[in-house]
Image (cartoon, helix red, strand yellow):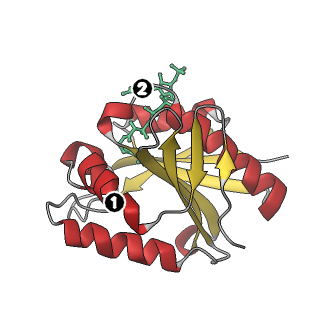
Amino acid sequence: MRTPVINAKRIILRPFCNNDLEDVFYGWENDPDVARYMYWQSHNDINKTKKWIKEEISKIDSDDWYRWAIVCKDNGKVIGTCLIYFEEEFNAFEIGYNLAKRAWGCGYTTEAMTEVIKFTRDKLHIKKVIGHCAKVNKASANVMKKLGFKFVRNMPYKCNEDEEPYEGEEYILDID
Ligand SMILES: CC(C)(COP(=O)(O)OP(=O)(O)OC[C@H]1O[C@@H](n2cnc3c(N)ncnc32)[C@H](O)[C@@H]1OP(=O)(O)O)[C@@H](O)C(=O)NCCC(=O)NCCS
């Protein structure tokens, strides 16, 4: 299914386009603080970001990968991204998100993911969604808890192409 545009209160979720390059690169991809617990590494090469956007655009009609740019209605800027995708390792749909640092702590991720969960329930008809985070990443765990996810287990959390995994946590949401 094509990744849809979703209209929320303060934000719009929409697929990425090439014009998002600078917002993505300067907003988060070159910021090690945002990348710390992500699967990707921060970089200072805007061409890598260009390639990333191209790959995301190529997946817009995928049935197992739904990624959105989170756009602030106030100023039209892309402030972050969120996704739900099928993770083969766990045989389940998994969520992910990150915001530009300047947008942290304003409830934007909770607002975005609330819409993503509604989409998952109403359009994908999926009953179970999982999420993982590093134990020290309280912001991420709190987003999931606010959305109704429940703690499942402790497990290693490998990210950022680091050699050693962090202590991590797995969460699950049963959608009714
Ligand atoms: C994780 C992240 C996306 C959270 O986004 P956010 O928009 O700031 O989160 P929200 O504002 O929706 O906050 C959700 C809840 O988490 C809490 N929270 C936010 N930041 C927090 C922090 N640094 N420490 C503890 N709790 C925090 C909020 O207080 C809120 O709960 P409340 O409404 O009861 O107060 C953002 O911090 C980020 O981009 N981090 C870097 C990337 C990342 O780690 N992604 C997740 C990888 S698993």
Q: Position of residue 96 (x, y in %)?
A: 50, 53
Q: Earlier in the sequence, mark 1 or mark 2?
A: 2
Can residue 123 be seen? yes
Mark 1 = which residue? Answer: 158
Element assignment for label 1: loop
In this rendering, the answer to whether 43 lies above or below 137 is below
Residue 79 placement, left or right of 91: left
Q: Position of residue 98 (x, y in %)?
A: 41, 47
- Choose top left, top right, bottom left or bottom right for residue 130: bottom right
Residue 171 placement, left or right of 169: right
Structural distance between the alpha carbons of marks 1 and 2: 25 Å
Residue at image point 68% right, 35% down: 148
* Residue at disc 1, CB closer than 8 Å to ligand 1: no
* Residue at disc 2, CB closer than 8 Å to ligand 1: yes
Nearer to the camera, 81 or 86: 81
Nearer to the camera, 90 or 115: 115
Q: Quadrant of the N terminus?
A: bottom right
> Which amino acid lies under the numbered mark 2 shown in the image of this protein?
Gly
Q: Position of residue 16 (x, y in %)?
A: 48, 63
Residue 105 - label: 2
Count of all numbered marks drawn on residues in the image: 2
Residue at image point 49% right, 74% down: 57
> Which amino acid lies under the numbered mark 1 shown in the image of this protein?
Lys
Residue 69 placement, left or right of 149: left
